[in-house]
């Protein structure tokens, strides 16, 4: 089609530009379908074109227009088919997505319901045990066997499975990172550097302590994430209120807007006021952080053994909370 347009010398308005034959100076009124060239009457009768199909320019022009129109209709039809196909696919995929959302919600609600029932049973058992402990020894011994049987029948769900129900993807916010902290490209790893980077001093950026926050805060729900400790050094991991101080000293306690556990030189403590020493049975290399916003709880555990490190006293959270990380002394961590 393109070659035909060139040979016919189609003008911008869609008409053929008729010209004069350079060889015979006659009007170019004919068109050779074989060689795709314009011909004058003399050229038409020449041996080179005598055996070819030759038509008048007007006829060739009309034939060209018909071909273009046919191609246009064909393309328009195919585009319509593609649009209908894409629309049908969109509706199908949207329906599947809705079904997946319903399934996920049902599974999540079922898990929450199971956990709630288990907690209710455990609370009832604890209440009965406390009452029995206050009774005289003879009365206590009478029911000791039945109480022990009740304790043995309690079945705990795997903590790892429970936590996995609420696991979220956490990435680090580069706008909050201290200039001496280096973040990976995907925002899932952070380590220290001895030389401060040239970064804009944004209001969110920490400039006093070597801290960085998660990119997304929480104002509701239950959330769990894990932190892998890659290099020896000092670290503080937990959550912080959005209002935490960025340019000056931070009071390391819930009163200062920080709920976190610290590890340094083989020692561990919860950042309370005063600090609470912790004595884990093994050195944690992977930390699990569990936040229940409505419940007001924050717990940290060894993500490998699921040993509880510390649960902060219940707090009525009122502000947006962000995953919090503070590193020094060569420490390096990764979110998993």
Image (cartoon, grey):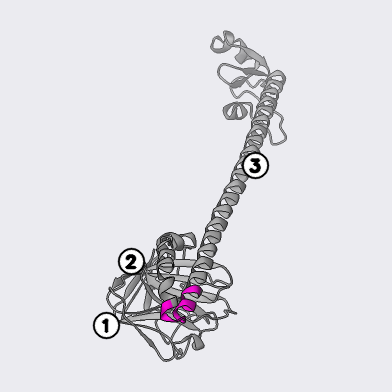
| SS class, disc 2 | loop
Query: What percent of the width, then of the height, locates residue 62?
Result: 71, 22
Q: Indicate left or right for 86 with 331 as reference.
A: right
Q: Nearer the viewer, residue 216 or 72?
A: 216
Secondary-structure class at tag 1? loop
Mark 3 packing: few (<14 Cα in 10 Å), some, or many (20+)?
Answer: few
Cα separation, mark 1 vs mark 2, equals 21 Å
Q: Position of residue 148 (x, y in %)?
A: 40, 67
- Compared with residue 37, is residue 153 higher up or lower down, i.e. above or below? below
Tag in front: 1 or 3: 1
Whether residue 277 is visible to the viewer of this picture, yes or no, is: yes
Q: Check residue 41 for magenta coloring.
A: no
Q: Which mark is residue 91?
A: 3
**Which residue in the protein does label 1 denote?**
265
Which mark is first along the chain, 2 or 1?
A: 1
Q: Quadrant of the N terminus?
A: top right
Mark 1, mark 2: which one is toward the viewer?
Answer: 2
| 195 or 312: nearer the viewer | 312
State the CA–CA distance, disc 1 to disc 3.
Answer: 58 Å
Indicate which disc residue 305 carries.
2
Query: Which span of residues is magenta-colored?
Result: 128-138
């Amino acid at each position: 089609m393109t070659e035909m347009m060139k040979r016919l010398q189609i003008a911008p308005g869609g008409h053929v530009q008729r010209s004069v034959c350079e060889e015979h100076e006659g009007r170019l009124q004919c068109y050779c379908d074989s060689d795709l060239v314009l011909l004058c009457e003399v050229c038409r009768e020449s041996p080179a074109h005598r055996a070819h199909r030759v038509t008048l320019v007007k006829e060739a022009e009309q034939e060209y227009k018909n071909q273009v129109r046919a191609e246009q209709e064909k393309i328009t039809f195919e585009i319509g088919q593609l649009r209908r196909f894409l629309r049908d696919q969109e509706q199908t995929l949207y329906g599947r997505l809705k079904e997946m959302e319903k399934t996920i919600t049902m599974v999540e609600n079922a898990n929450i319901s199971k956990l709630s029932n288990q907690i209710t049973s455990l609370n009832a058992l604890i209440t009965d045990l406390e009452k029995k402990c206050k009774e005289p020894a003879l009365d206590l011994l009478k029911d000791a066997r039945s109480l022990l049987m009740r304790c043995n029948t309690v079945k705990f769900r795997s903590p790892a499975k429970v936590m996995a129900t609420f696991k979220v993807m956490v990435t680090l916010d580069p706008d909050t990172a201290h200039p001496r902290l280096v973040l990976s490209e995907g925002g899932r790893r952070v380590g220290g550097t001895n030389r401060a980077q040239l970064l804009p001093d944004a209001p969110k950026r920490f400039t006093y302590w070597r801290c960085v926050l998660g990119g997304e805060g929480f104002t509701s729900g239950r959330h769990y994430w894990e932190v892998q400790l890659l290099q020896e050094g000092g670290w503080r991991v937990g959550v912080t209120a959005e209002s935490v101080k960025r340019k000056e000293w931070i009071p390391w306690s819930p009163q200062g807007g920080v709920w976190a556990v610290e590890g340094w030189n083989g020692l561990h403590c919860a950042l309370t006021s005063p600090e609470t020493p912790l004595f884990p049975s093994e050195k944690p290399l992977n930390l699990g952080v569990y936040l229940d916003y409505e419940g007001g709880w924050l717990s940290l555990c060894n993500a490998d053994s699921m040993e509880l490190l510390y649960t902060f006293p219940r707090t009525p959270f009122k502000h947006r909370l962000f995953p919090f990380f503070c590193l020094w002394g060569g420490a390096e961590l990764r979110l998993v």
